[in-house]
Image: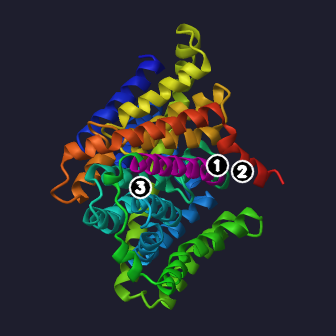
Amino acid sequence: MSNEMIALLMFSSMMLMLLTGQRVFGAIGIVASIAALTLWGGAGGHDIPFTAAMKLMKWYPLLTLPMFIFMGYVLSESRIADDLYRMFHVWMGSVHGGLAIGTIGLMVLISAMNGLSVAGMAIGATIALPELLRRNYDKRMVTGVIQAGSSLGILVPPSVVLVLYAMIARQPVGQLWLAGVFPGLMMATLFILYIAIRCKLQPNLGPTLSVEEREKITMAEKLRLLRAGLLPIVIFASMMVPFINGWTSLVESSAIGAMTAFIAAILKGRMTRAVFETSVRNTLGISCMFMWIILAALGFGAVFDGLGAVDAIDDLFTERLGLNPWMILILMQLSFLLMGTFLDDTAMLVIVAPLYVPLVKALGFDLIWYGVLYTITTQIAYMTPPFGYNLFLMRAMAPPQITLGDIYSSILPFVGVMILALVLLMTFPDIALWLPQYVYGR
């Protein structure tokens, strides 16, 4: 059997196992292990997982993962996010669609605190959604706002998904995070512009707060909420400013962020035993899950490298089919959209990284830029009907009056906005590359 056929058999076996509901790291790791032992026997086959484990243990930036996850859970479990939403509520309530715009702002800050889209979805569905519906906002508008805003969690630093990409693609995490800043802010700005324009044209979609309610909120109350709402921004700045200026390493900055969040929760009197225990347990669970996924991906990638599968795919696209690099890149992005119908962002990355990352490098594209491009594409993928991953998360968290049909129709305009952002990033790569080049080039 040729190496190309073995690679195809491995890929199809992995996809079949994933369709049975097997855990991502289990499906990938089992296929990689069986293939390694079959191809190279006991001696060579054993070396692959051992080498992958040693590579994982020696990857110093991986220490940032539990730090940022802990920081996010401390801030969310201590209800500091509630203060954020209340701040946006009182400051944006006089504008048509103002609370929806404030929800996008909330999601940006939640993304900067946590790095996971699920956290933004949970906070948006439990805090923002009931309030928006109570204020007579259109239910389709607000469900789309929360889904789109929560997707920023995997793009805005400290993105956990970009940490995973950095490990698999062997790229610096710091540069990837900085590369996600402007694209994330650009996408959030496009969301806000869409909401503002549409609610200006159709005021019934996003009514303002009543005059009576606005008069009840004093300036002193507004300023108090502004101080409380700015706390997460101060925490984010306390860890990112030293890192960007070169005063601390990435790991040291992550430790500063985790400690600052912990101290802030204590000072506000919200660091209870239950909050601490929940934060630690969730941090341990998610960190271990990601480490198993990275380990499985490294092993799978090592087998693919040994088979020469990447060279075979490169030859297929460039020599046999005669496609140019941009056409190949677009086909790769379309495959993400297809996989997003039944896989989450982490699973997609782990499955295709052994193939796509070396291919992207061989085609002459920047791997930092491609990491951001991949992230935006997966954001679109798992929000696209009929089987988008985020759609079902939203359905599980939404109240009964919001149907699956409402959720499907609500996301389509925001998907269009995200495709626009993707096109802008592909047309102007410096949107992602300027900041890391500026910081690391000094």
Residue 372 on the magenta span: no
Distance between the alpha carbons at the discs numbered 3 and 1 = 19 Å
Q: Amino acid at mark 2?
A: Leu
Task: Look at the numbered discs 3 and 1 and tell me whether their residues touch, using CB distance below 8 Å.
Answer: no
The residue under label 3 is which amino acid type? Ser
The residue carrying mark 2 is 435
What residue is pinned by disc 1?
Answer: 179
The answer to which quarter of the image holds residue 34 is top left
Q: Which mark is residue 400?
A: none
Tell me what residue is drawn at x 23 percent, y 46 percent.
Answer: 406
Q: Tell me residue 423's x, y (percent).
A: 55, 32
The residue singled out by tag 3 in the image is 150
Which residue does the image show at 70% across and 68% down from the upper left? 241
* Quadrant holding the N terminus: top left
- Left or right: 170 as drawn, with respect to 20: right
- Neighbor class of circle 2 (other Cα within 10 Å; few <14, some 14-19, many 20+) is many
Residue under the point 34% across and 49% down: 144
Q: Nearer the viewer, residue 421 or 51?
A: 421
Considering only order in the chain, which callout, 2 or 3, is on the residue closer to the N terminus? Answer: 3
> Seen from this angle, which residue lies furthest front?
211
Cβ atoms at labels 2 and 1 below 8 Å apart: yes
Q: CA distance from mark 3 to mark 2?
A: 23 Å
Image vertical order of residue 60 relative to residue 358, above or below: below
> From this viewpoint, which residue is outermost toward the right?
442
29 to 423, vertically: above or below: below
Residue 33 appears in the rendering: no
Label 1 amino acid?
Ala
Identify the secondary structure beneath mark 2. helix
In the rendered image, residue 193, in percent from the top left (x then y), is placed at 50, 48
Instruction: Report the quarter where the C terminus lies.
Output: bottom right
